[in-house]
Image: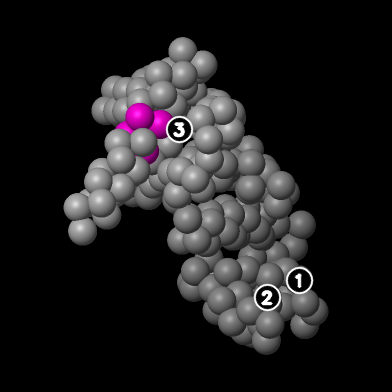
Amino acid sequence: MVDREITGIKVQKRNPDRVSIYLDGEYAFGLSRIVAAWLYTGQRLSDEKINTLCSEDGYEVAYQKALMLINHRQRTSYEIRQKLNEKGFSDSQIDEVLLKLQRAGLVEDGKYAQLWVENRNSFHPRSQRLMRMELLHKGVANEDIEKALAGSAEDAELATQAAMQQIRKYSHLNWEDFRKKLSAFLLRRGFSYGTVAPVVRSVWESVNDSRIQIKNEEFEK
């Protein structure tokens, strides 16, 4: 095949990060500006070179898409692979992108799992079993999950913390309604009944102690 001459390189109006390449006077394909950086008008391209450029462009586009994903929020390797796969990128392109992100420390599943557990413990307490399921769903390896959970609070402590976050909703209820509603809430957070029952009883006693103390203070006044 005869080499084709670059007769024009124009920045695309809708996306200034990409350029349109014209060969022999006709539009041929688009490239990211990074991939097209060394091209110039008058340069001749073989079919092999054109294929290489298009392949590099596909990888670059996939990489930029991945950066956009993790700039929005941190993600696991599995989540990034899923998103890029949905956008039509090949497995080889996705593999290259993930390798580059991992080498740069931008995607670390182990660190992700650790931060996930810490966040759950601090703001949305739930059982270790449920946290394990959440991380498995995100494609985190068992080894990374176990390391992250090793630093987690125990279920009894997490259940108590979760219960105390809901105490205002249920503190006015009688024992039976209090037990049912708080138990259902904690069970939805993944705690076993063996953990839930004593925690609910303990929190109920704490609520009653507070009520008695308030009444005593009011009486003394």
Q: Nearer the viewer, mark 2 or mark 3?
A: 3
Among numbered discs 2 and 1, the one appearing first in the sequence: 2
Rendered view: 191 above or below 108: above
**Where does residue 115 sit, x and y in percent of width and height?**
35, 42
Callout 2 touching callout 3 (CB < 8 Å): no
Q: Looking at the rendering, which quadrant does residue 102 occupy?
A: top left
Q: Secondary structure at mark 2?
A: strand
Which element type, helix, strand or loop, lies under badge 1?
strand
Marked residue nearer the N-terminal end (2 or 3): 2
Main secondary structure along the magenta-highlighted residues: helix
User: Would residue 121 be found to the left or right of residue 216 on screen?
Assistant: right
Pointer 2 residue: 21
User: Residue at position x 68%, y 75% from top?
Assistant: 21
Secondary element at tag 3: loop
Q: Are marks 2 and 1 in contact (CB under 8 Å)?
A: yes
Read off the magenta span. Answer: 203-207
Residue placed most toward the observer, 201 or 114: 201
Which residue in the protein does label 3 denote?
126
Q: Quadrant of the N terminus?
A: bottom right
Q: Residue at x 19, y 52 (%)?
A: 220
* Amino acid type for the residue under numbered disc 2: Ile
Q: Nearer the viewer, residue 32 or 141?
A: 141
Please name the amino acid that badge 1 sits on. Ala
Inspect the image, locate mark 3, and give the three-letter code of the amino acid beneath it.
Arg
The answer to whether residue 193 is above or below residue 171 is above
**Label 3 vs label 1: CA separation?**
55 Å
Residue 221 percent across, percent down from the top left: 21, 58
Q: Which residue bears the numbered disc 1?
A: 28
- Measured Cα–Cα span from mark 2 to mark 3: 54 Å
